[in-house]
Amino acid sequence: MRAARGKEGASLARPRGAALLGLLAASALLALALPSFPGAGPCWGANGTRGCPRPARRPPPALLDELSRRQRDLLRLATSAGDTELGLSRGGRLGCGDLSRVTELGVVGSGFTKLVLRAALPGTGAIALKSVHRGGSDVSRCVQRYGHPAGCHRLASYKLLKEVTLLQRLDHPGVVKLHGQCYDNSLDPEIRVIAMLELGSPLEMIQLLQTPWEERFKICLSLVKLLFYLAHSPLGSIVLLDFQPRQFVMVDGNLKVTDMDDASTEELSCKEDNDCTLDFPGKSFILKCTAAGKCDGLNEKKNLFNAYRYFFTYLLPHTAPSALRPLLGDILNATGDLRYGINETLGAFEKVLHLYKSGLYLQKRLPLLKEYITLKGFRTMEMHDYKCWPSYSHLGCLLSIYNAEEAAAICNSQPQCQSFIVTQQRTWTGRPLASFRSSLTDLIPDVNAVLYIKRSAPSRERL
Ligand SMILES: Nc1ncnc2c1ncn2[C@@H]1O[C@H](COP(=O)(O)OP(=O)(O)O)[C@@H](O)[C@H]1O
Ligand SMILES: *[C@@H]1O[C@H](CO)[C@@H](O)[C@H](O)[C@H]1NC(C)=O
Ligand SMILES: *[C@@H]1O[C@H](CO)[C@@H](O)[C@H](O)[C@H]1NC(C)=O
Ligand SMILES: [Mg+2]
């Protein structure tokens, strides 16, 4: 990729916030607005068809209005609370100069407005590069409407700039990390913005449905923690207006929001409760209008209901430990009816996590472990064995357990199971993984493993 070199390239030593303000204050928009801009008015190509040679004519007034509205919105955000050392230190350390060093470019995703490439950067590793998607629906619709590619590209660039500005000011494990950015306004009247982000992988809902409940619970919990952070962020309560699974990515098994251009920190103003209607397909809520004339907690509730309809309903209930189902049902019901705010929701999730981690969810059962012979310091060779669902390994039946007693109950419930090995491997909650086996061949020493063999197991004589 060609390194973009512009005014920002020369200003890398200055704080990033200053660079952004410089960029916004630059002459480009003013030039666009000037009536004497060269080529103003309709222009005709050599063969009589309508077309515009560079430099482009002035954008139509409606587009100029939109541009200045976006610019004002951006300036307000850039100069609002959080634009101190705190915000700037999170701008990341990469800049335009680093773009000349990237290799192995490949597309990882695109949306309405932006195109995302993966790139390898020596010394940093794989990163994501976000830029305006020239052929995307956002830009093309705008061009169709206003017939002004440069102005439309600039309009879309403002969205990306807004996202970068927000990412600089937000600091949470649930928000994708900004490694740096590059602004180039030497292309006047266009600007080029490239955001350098930590690389994730797209969220695959279908795939997630096949993962163990514990992993799906983790994703929902990370989302709840993110929404708690957004509700109490340094910029105020932030709502994600375009809340969909595709605005999130997974990084090392953690859910992170990546698309922030459609976020808002404004709470809706109101005169009466009826002004505070939250409309969703098939469901609507009327919230309170506060004495200060703002809809009470509307941003927080909008996020929460979206989390309910796009994430919780799919990921939380099925294959959950049966003793946790009533609690999970309460969470679904309370978020689906917006009876809970984000604070109570987080409280309820943490309660579930506690019950799960501490094994309190286990139902009282007859002790079954005494039906097993214990062999400390051994395991069997890793090889194909019978499968169970949802297993942590595709080779066999690998499940998260609370203790050996729970594993014995699981083994007893599976007709093929003759033995199980409790390994040193842990899930994110700290629970061990147990490997359930139908055959007992090739025992090998492993100080970190404990092998349990069913006393009635037919293959016992092989020992
Ligand atoms: N950091 C990232 N790592 C990997 N893929 C990403 C990253 N950020 C975004 N993507 C992918 O690119 C797509 C488009 O990015 P997004 O910011 O949502 O753009 P848009 O505003 O056009 O929707 C996302 O749906 C996602 O699949
Ligand atoms: C919550 O439970 C009540 C009472 O059982 C029921 O009427 C309501 O539809 C439930 N709401 C959701 C979102 O499941
Ligand atoms: C939610 O928790 C935050 C942070 O602990 C606190 O500031 C806020 O007052 C709480 N809100 C409600 C409605 O309890
Ligand atoms: Mg998106």
Image: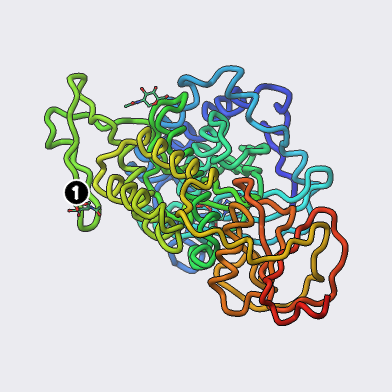
Residue 1: give x, y in percent of width and height. 74, 53
Front position in the image: 177 or 80: 177
On screen, residue 155 above or below 236: below
**Left or right, residue 314 beside residue 356:** left
Q: Quadrant of the C terminus?
A: bottom right
Q: Viewer-proximal residue, 331 or 36?
A: 331
Q: Which residue was labeled with disc 1? A: 284
Residue 142 at least partly seen: no
In the image, residue 70 sits, relative to residue 422, either above or below, namely above
Q: Tell me what residue is drawn at x 37 percent, y 53 percent.
A: 146
Q: Residue furthest top?
A: 84
Percent coordinates x, y for residue 403 in the rendering: 62, 53
Q: How busy is the neighbourhood of tag 1: few (under 14 within 10 Å), some, or many (20 plus)?
A: few
* Residue 91 location, quadrant: top right
Q: Is residue 291 left or right of residue 341?
A: left
Name the quarter showing ligand 3: top left
Which residue corresponds to the image point at 87% horizontal and 67% vertical from the top-left?
444
- Identify which amino acid the numbered label 1 is placed on: Ser
Q: Position of residue 373 (x, y in %)?
A: 72, 65
- The x, y position of residue 352, in whole percent, is 44, 44
Q: Is residue 299 above or below residue 202?
A: above
Q: How many numbered circles are shown?
A: 1
Residue occupying the far right of the picture: 445
The residue located at (55%, 37%) in the rendering is 164
